[in-house]
Each structure stands twice: as C-alpha cells, then as structure tokens.
Image (cartoon, coloured by chain):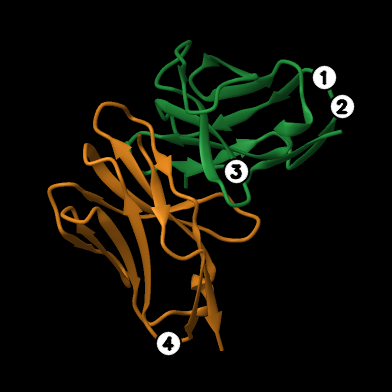
Chain colours: A orange, B green
Amino acid sequence: GESVGLHLPTLSVQEGDNSIINCAYSNSASDYFIWYKQESGKGPQFIIDIRSNMDKRQGQRVTVLLNKTVKHLSLQIAATQPGDSAVYFCAESPNRDDKIIFGKGTRLHILP
Amino acid sequence: DVKVTQSSRYLVKRTGEKVFLECVQDMDHENMFWYRQDPGLGLRLIYFSYDVKMKEKGDIPEGYSVSREKKERFSLILESASTNQTSMYLCASSTRITEAFFGQGTRLTVV
C-alpha cells in the first residue's frame, strides 16, 4: 500500500553546515513529492515540491532530489541556520486523488 | 497571507461527548483537510473536501464525521469522543494539490 517513511528520526547538524534529510516512498504512481517544515507549536509549512518527471528542483537555500529508481527523496538545506530547527516531513500526492500523504517526520537539531 | 484559523488551541472533553472542531480559511480555497498528528505516527488524513457539501474519507475516518456547508468552513465532528482520540488535530486548505496551508492545531484531550 501507500507509505512514506524516513530513514532517521533525528538529525543533528552543525550551524553553517549543509543538512540532508532523506525519505523513502513506496508508491511509484505518486505524481508529486513534497517537503513540509513544522516548527514547535505551529502547523506544517510548505517548503518545496517536485513532480515525478523531474530529478531535481531548487528553491531558496533548499534543493529536493528525486531518485525514482530507488524510490528515494531528499531535502538538502544549504548553510543550516538556527531557524531551520524543526521537524521535516516528506509527503506524496497520488496522481488519482488530490490528497497529501505524510511521512512520520525527521527532527533537525542545529548544533551551535 | 493565507490564514487558516482553528477555533480552539486546547480542548478537554469527557468520554462520550460530541465534539466539534471548527476550521475557517480566508483564501477561497476549494480543498480542505483534517489531519491528526500523533508522536511517531506523523500526520494522518481523517477527511478531506474538494467543494461545499462534498467530503471524502481519508485514511482514518472511523469515529469522525465532517461538515462543509460553506466554502470557507470545514468542521470535524467526533460523534462520541473516546480516549484514543486524544491528539493534535490540524486543519489545512489548498488550491494547489501540494501546497496546503495549515492552522495552528487543536490539542484535544479526552478524559
């Protein structure tokens, strides 16, 4: 069935370094893959998405990579800042429906 | 800025009570969603709606119902609250499939 999961529940990164958050998915039919950020006490916030016909997409300080061969999604954050401390969720949107299915999340912890 | 407002940040209800969680969005979005968030389980979709008076079951609809009488308002109803429905409830709206805007959440405790 559909599932979106993460390799690591917690990731600690030195401030200023690049962060890489990984995600595995199982539904090959999904058309969109998405990353959300949830800060403490807030609802999730959209970061970036990528369509299944793309391998890479860049935003402001973030890059999403999609490897359909191994069903792997990653989010790269350049020059990690204290404000990047949050839980990051990967998600997918199956092409038959307009709903979003979320993974379990990875907590990104920034070391001073 | 898009604003999704959930009526309560914290609620405490008794087992067996009928509970209403209200959500209002101000951006004329067609799509609205209710999720619950539990530690270690991420966000799980309860119900969603693409239009007024329309609803679709998500992954965990049991014990819940919804109402969408107006485009801007999407209500989640717990017909008879149980302790296993203690959770954080998140409402979201969207016009694009992937970019959903979430409210602050309602932390519901059923005692």
Q: Which residue is mark 4?
A: A16
* Quarter of image, res A99: top left
Q: Which residue is mark 1?
A: B17
Which label number is shown at residue B14?
A: 2
Q: Which amino acid type is shown beneath numbered disc 3? A: Gln
Which label number is shown at residue A12?
A: none
Q: Which amino acid type is shown beneath numbered disc 4? A: Gly
**What SS does tag 2 mark?**
loop
- Please report whichever mark, 3 or 1, sits nearer to the chain's N-terminal start: 1
Q: Which residue is mark 3?
A: B37
Q: Are marks 2 and 1 in contact (CB under 8 Å)?
A: yes
Q: Disc 2 versus disc 1: distance between alpha carbons?
A: 6 Å
**What SS does tag 3 mark?**
strand
- Asked if badge 4 and badge 2 are on a common chain, one would say no
Q: Are marks 3 and 2 in contact (CB under 8 Å)?
A: no
Q: Which amino acid type is shown beneath numbered disc 2? A: Arg
Q: Residues within 10 Å of mark 2 (few under 14, many from 20)?
A: some
Residue at the spot 46% in from the left edge and 34% down from the top edge? B93
Q: Position of residue A65 (x, y in %)?
A: 23, 62
Q: Disc 4 versus disc 2: distance between alpha carbons?
A: 48 Å
Q: Position of residue B11 (x, y in %)?
A: 80, 36
Q: Disc 4 versus disc 3: distance between alpha carbons?
A: 31 Å
